């Protein structure tokens, strides 16, 4: 059965939702599912903007057949070649043998690399600034390299002000009937997943996102809709979401507050983390989020690290090193280029306390533009009352650094 929604008078969402996939990119948990968005324009010519993951191909085909209602598909426009959007290209070519492909040079190269048999079909190669008319609707193309792959581009329908933004402005989470961001409580129910999606998938490429935002800035007044490849379509409050993207891609904190991530084997380091959280809240800073590094997926920790201004790392010493899960978190922060945060450290060890020095060295040497506070809480096995002064000094230092 088809499941489509109208975006504008001429444009339909013909994508699909996926609740079966446990790990996006076989890496990131998606308990709320994910949508693969594809769009069909009905003009003098008919156009499909991107396809979907192979697992959702049948739904796409049913949706497309319903919307086309017997018409031919004239064009398949490919903005992004990653298989969660491009896997069905060949199937579309088989079903609609006269369809012409529109994309850029790198995307056509990747199509062949992935083994899609596009040769024999008309392949129209476009580049940034080119325009193309489908009748009433004219589109123009803007390169978006590394947002998220090098071939990525976005397409602006200048007639209706629809930006097909590829992975940009996407989010985890299945749509389940709702299509528009103004049909959900986005800030309450979607923002965390939007940040987790962006920071983990493209966090490393903040400068490339900034470049795309700069290009979009020149035509911002023309953009009425943002149609990403995942998650809701934006037709209201576009500026609010664009500002979030700007913040995340500049590696600026979204919230003045404290993220506490602890690695605790028997609860003693966790106890110190809890005591610090209590002290911070007692002193008036209640924007505190705390996670056990062992039971929280690192993609969520990354999202929170991009959110908060201050990060407390609390770790036991393990094999004379940093606890493995904490080390993974540090490595991920490095890989995703997180910058401009203030760190505080809690260390623990029963005979050789090493984790504090090692975490400090990692933050100083491996991460960019980070500050590590001089105050540190150092524990031998557990936190006794004799450590109260050190704990309060650490909380005071965190608050002082926020001024
Ligand atoms: Fe959703 Fe980069 O693909």
Image (cartoon, rainbow, N blue to C red):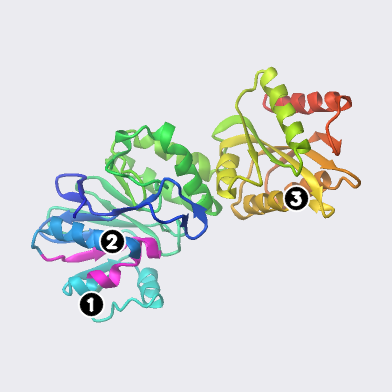
Q: How many numbered badges does the structure rendering display?
A: 3
Find residue 190 and report its image quarter.
top left
For label 3, the crowd category at 10 Å Cα-Cα, with few meaning under 14, some 14 to 19 and many 20 or more, is many
The answer to whether any part of residue 223 appears in the image is no
Q: Circle 2 — which element? A: loop
| Relative image position of residue 93 (x, y in whole percent) | 23, 72
The answer to whether any part of residue 181 appears in the image is yes
Q: Is 15 left or right of 333, judged from the image as shown?
A: left
For label 1, the crowd category at 10 Å Cα-Cα, with few meaning under 14, some 14 to 19 and many 20 or more, is few
| Relative image position of residue 300 (x, y in whole percent) | 56, 44
- On screen, residue 165 above or below 220: below
| Relative image position of residue 47 (x, y in whole percent) | 19, 60
Question: Marks 2 and 1, Cα distance to the nearest angstrom?
Answer: 21 Å
Q: Residue at x 73, y 33 (%)?
A: 273
Q: Is 277 left or right of 296, judged from the image as shown?
A: right
**Relative to the observer, which residue lies in front, 250 or 173?**
173
Residue at the spot of label 2: 130
Q: Circle 3 — which element? A: loop
Q: Tell me which segment is drawn in magenta.
A: 72-92
The quadrant where ligand 1 appears is bottom left
Camera-near label (2 vs 3) is 3
Q: Is 189 left or right of 64, judged from the image as shown?
A: right
For label 2, the crowd category at 10 Å Cα-Cα, with few meaning under 14, some 14 to 19 and many 20 or more, is few
Cβ–Cβ under 8 Å for marks 1 and 3: no
- Quadrant in which the C terminus is drawn: top right
**Relative to the observer, which residue lies in front, 217 or 226?**
226
Q: Is 245 left or right of 39, judged from the image as shown?
A: right
- Quadrant in which the N terminus is drawn: bottom left
Mark 2 or mark 1: which comes first in sequence?
A: 1
Residue at the spot of label 3: 323
């Amino acid at each position: 059965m088809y499941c489509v929604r109208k975006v504008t008078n001429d444009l339909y969402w013909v994508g699909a939702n996926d609740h079966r996939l446990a790990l996006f990119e076989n890496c990131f948990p998606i308990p709320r599912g994910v949508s693969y968005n594809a769009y069909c324009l009905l003009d003098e010519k008919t156009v499909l903007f991107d396809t979907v993951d192979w697992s959702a191909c049948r739904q796409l085909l049913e949706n497309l057949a319903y919307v086309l209602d017997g018409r031919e598909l004239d064009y398949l426009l490919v903005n992004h070649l990653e298989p969660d959007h491009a896997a069905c290209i060949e199937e579309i070519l088989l079903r609609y043998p006269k369809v012409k492909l529109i994309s850029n040079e790198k995307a056509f190269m990747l199509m062949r690399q992935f083994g899609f048999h596009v040769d024999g079909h008309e392949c129209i190669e476009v580049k940034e600034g080119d325009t193309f008319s489908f009748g009433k609707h004219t589109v123009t193309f803007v390169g978006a390299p590394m947002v998220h792959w090098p071939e990525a581009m976005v397409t602006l329908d200048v007639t209706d002000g629809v930006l097909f933004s590829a992975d940009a402005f996407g989010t985890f989470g299945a749509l389940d009937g709702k299509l528009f961001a103004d049909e959900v409580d986005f800030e309450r129910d979607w923002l965390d997943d939007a940040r987790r999606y962006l920071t983990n998938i493209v966090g490393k490429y903040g400068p490339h996102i900034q470049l795309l935002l700069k290009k979009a800035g020149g035509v911002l007044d023309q953009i009425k809709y943002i149609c990403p490849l995942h998650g809701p379509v934006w037709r209201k409050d576009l500026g609010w979401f664009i500002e979030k993207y700007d913040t995340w891609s500049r590696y600026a904190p979204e919230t003045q507050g404290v993220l506490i991530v602890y690695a605790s084997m028997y609860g003693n380091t966790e106890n110190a983390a809890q005591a610090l959280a209590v002290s911070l809240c007692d002193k008036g800073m209640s924007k505190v989020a705390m996670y056990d590094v062992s039971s929280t997926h690192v993609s969520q920790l990354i999202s929170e690290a991009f959110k908060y201004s201050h990060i407390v790392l609390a770790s036991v010493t393990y094999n004379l090193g940093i606890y493995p899960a904490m080390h993974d978190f540090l490595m991920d922060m490095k890989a995703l280029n997180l910058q401009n945060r203030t760190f505080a450290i809690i260390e623990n060890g029963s005979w050789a306390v090493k984790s504090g020095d090692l975490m400090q060295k990692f933050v100083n040497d491996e991460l960019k533009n980070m500050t590590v506070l001089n105050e540190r809480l150092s524990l031998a096995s557990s936190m006794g009352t004799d450590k109260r002064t050190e704990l309060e000094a650490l909380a005071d230092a965190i608050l002082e650094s926020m001024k």
